[in-house]
């Protein structure tokens, strides 16, 4: 058994891991793109490793740092099954279509051909059942709690050994998602370590922090910009805001319909939200219980979605008139592109603007510079001064923190023989490794 890393071993992005076993058998777990400073070290996204023994791809979830290189994998000649959860199989075509338009081609014919090829290779599998794959191996999927459909893979090899790939593990506190489920055992546990050196705020604290920003927006009639990933964070923020607005309306005794604009300016996020609503059977317990009294927990009366580019430009012009306070959710989550860039360019210089980061910001991205309190930021080559108030809310992270990662390992019925840390920068990996070793685990 040999584990080879093609990405996300010395950093966070570009997840791609190859496991070989037996006489010429192997598979890939994820095939993502590099982002931020890591993209500068890997300027070409083409697959530069041989595919000779790779008989399948296990896809933990659809975020582009785990799935974005799939077009290049197929271009390199990959024609093997892609195993994933059912929600991932539904979400992947949307992610691939967007990724293709940005970095591969805008030809509708080529995109359609590629999506047809991907759908042909997809093999969705239900959770909690063993499924045979090539190489006399078998896989079992467990909820990872990171994003809808995110999966932990148990891989059982012909010699009886078990390798577990966690992908990205969630906090277990997102009401829209099922909680991560630890495997019973692992000869090798390949564990993410994004926040191996940090502890997140509690859900109560994060709600209070977001509510405080929203109250400030209502009071100073400014603009709050939330750069959110189209899949996962956008839906979680909408769910949370729905509850906050209900509390504010009860408190004031009047509707907020004509008091504030809530705008989702991302066609992709809107499409993802529709898919989220159609897959409520895969939601977490709290959200499913809420569905019994609120059949649309991702929709509220003052919510507007922006579709076309012309609508986007009209929205920018409308907000500049400051007719109402506004909350804008737009991609991309790290401010590396997308419509959020235009909102930042227009409103960064206003002291009544709030910018709320709710996800991981890779080193070297505009989001990283803003979240660490820079007085200025460069957007599309131009320097912009920052007068806005910037908030980093770790409590909304989709990644488990140090305590949750350790708890995930401790909840295994049998301690893993070895742990390999991936998907983390040097410091978080080092600190998490030290904490695990103190508890008696072998980290290799």
Image (cartoon, grey):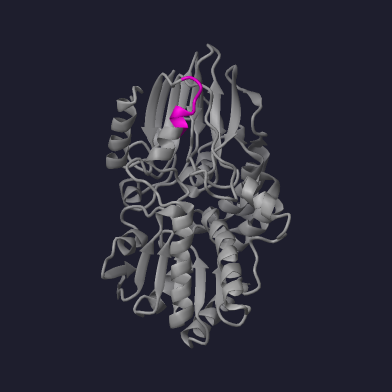
369 up-or-down from 194: above or below: below
**Which quarter of the figure has residue 375?**
bottom left
Q: Is residue 411 magenta?
A: yes
* Left or right of 433, for residue 246: right
Kindly tell me whether residue 381 is visible in this rendering. no
**Residue 345 screen position, x and y as percent:** 39, 75
Front residue (pair 269, 406): 406
Residue at point 54% right, 49% down?
174
Residue drawn at the location 66% of the way across and 73% of the way down? 301
Compared to residue 359, the image places residue 21 above or below, namely above
Which residue is located at x 45 percent, y 45 percent? 399
Question: Is 398 drawn above or below residue 332 in the view shown?
Answer: above
- Viewer-proximal residue among 73 and 67: 67
Residue 100: within the magenta?
no
| Residue occupying the point 55% across, 56% down | 236
User: Can you give x and y, in whole percent of width and height, for residue 357 in the image?
Assistant: 41, 61
Q: Left or right: where does residue 388 sit relative to residue 338?
A: left
Relative to 104, is 178 on the left or the right? Answer: right
In terms of depth relative to the viewer, which is nearer, 374 or 27?
374
Magenta segment boundaries in residue numbering: 408-414
Toward which corner of the image does residue 239 lie, by quadrant? Answer: bottom right
Q: The C terminus lies in which quarter of the figure?
A: top left
* Location of residue 23 in the rendering, given as x and y in whole percent from the top left corner: 50, 13
- Residue 62 in sight: yes
Q: Quadrant of the N terminus?
A: top left
Point out the residue furthest to the top here: 159
| Residue 67 image position (x, y, % from top left) | 51, 44
Using the image as rendered, state which of residue 347 and residue 351 is in the foreground.
Answer: 351
């Amino acid at each position: 058994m040999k584990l080879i890393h093609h990405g996300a071993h010395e950093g966070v992005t570009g997840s791609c891991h190859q496991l070989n076993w037996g006489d010429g058998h192997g598979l890939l777990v994820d095939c993502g793109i590099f982002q931020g400073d890591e993209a500068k070290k890997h300027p070409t996204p083409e697959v530069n490793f041989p595919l000779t023994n790779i008989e399948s791809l296990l896809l933990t979830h659809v975020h582009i740092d785990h799935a974005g290189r799939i077009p290049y994998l197929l271009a390199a000649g990959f024609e093997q099954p892609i195993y994933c959860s059912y929600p991932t199989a539904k979400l992947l075509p949307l992610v691939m279509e967007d990724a293709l338009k940005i970095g591969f081609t805008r030809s509708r014919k080529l995109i359609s051909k590629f999506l047809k090829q991907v759908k042909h290779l997809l093999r969705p599998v239900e959770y909690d059942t063993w499924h045979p794959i090539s190489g006399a191996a078998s896989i079992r999927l467990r909820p990872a709690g990171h994003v809808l459909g995110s999966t932990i893979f148990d891989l059982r090899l012909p010699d009886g050994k078990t390798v577990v790939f966690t992908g990205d593990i969630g906090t277990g506190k997102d009401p829209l998602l099922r909680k991560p489920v630890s495997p019973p055992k692992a000869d090798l546990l390949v564990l993410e370590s994004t926040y191996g050196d940090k502890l997140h705020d509690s859900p109560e604290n994060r709600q209070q922090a977001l509510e405080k920003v929203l109250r400030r927006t209502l009071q100073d009639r400014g603009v709050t910009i939330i750069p959110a990933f189209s899949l996962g964070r956008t839906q979680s923020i909408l769910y949370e805001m729905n509850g906050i607005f209900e509390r504010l309306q009860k408190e004031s005794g009047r509707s907020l319909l004509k008091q504030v604009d809530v705008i989702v300016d991302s066609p992709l996020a809107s499409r993802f939200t529709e898919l989220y609503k159609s897959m409520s059977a895969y939601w977490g317990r709290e959200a499913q219980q809420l569905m019994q009294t609120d059949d649309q927990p991702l929709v509220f009366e003052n919510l507007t979605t922006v579709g076309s580019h012309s609508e986007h430009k009209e929205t920018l012009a409308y907000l500049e008139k400051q007719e109402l306070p506004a909350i804008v959710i737009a991609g991309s989550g790290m401010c590396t592109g997308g419509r959020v860039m235009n909102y930042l360019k227009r409103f960064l210089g206003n002291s009544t603007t709030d910018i709320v980061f709710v996800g991981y910001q890779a080193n070297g991205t505009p989001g990283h510079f803003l979240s660490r309190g820079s007085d200025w930021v460069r957007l599309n080559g131009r320097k912009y001064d920052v007068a806005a108030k910037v908030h980093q809310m770790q409590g909304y992270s989709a990644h488990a923190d140090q305590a949750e990662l350790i708890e995930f390992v401790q909840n295994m019925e049998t301690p893993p023989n070895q742990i390999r840390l991936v998907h983390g920068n040097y410091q978080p990996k080092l600190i998490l490794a030290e904490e695990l070793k103190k508890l008696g685990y072998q980290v290799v």
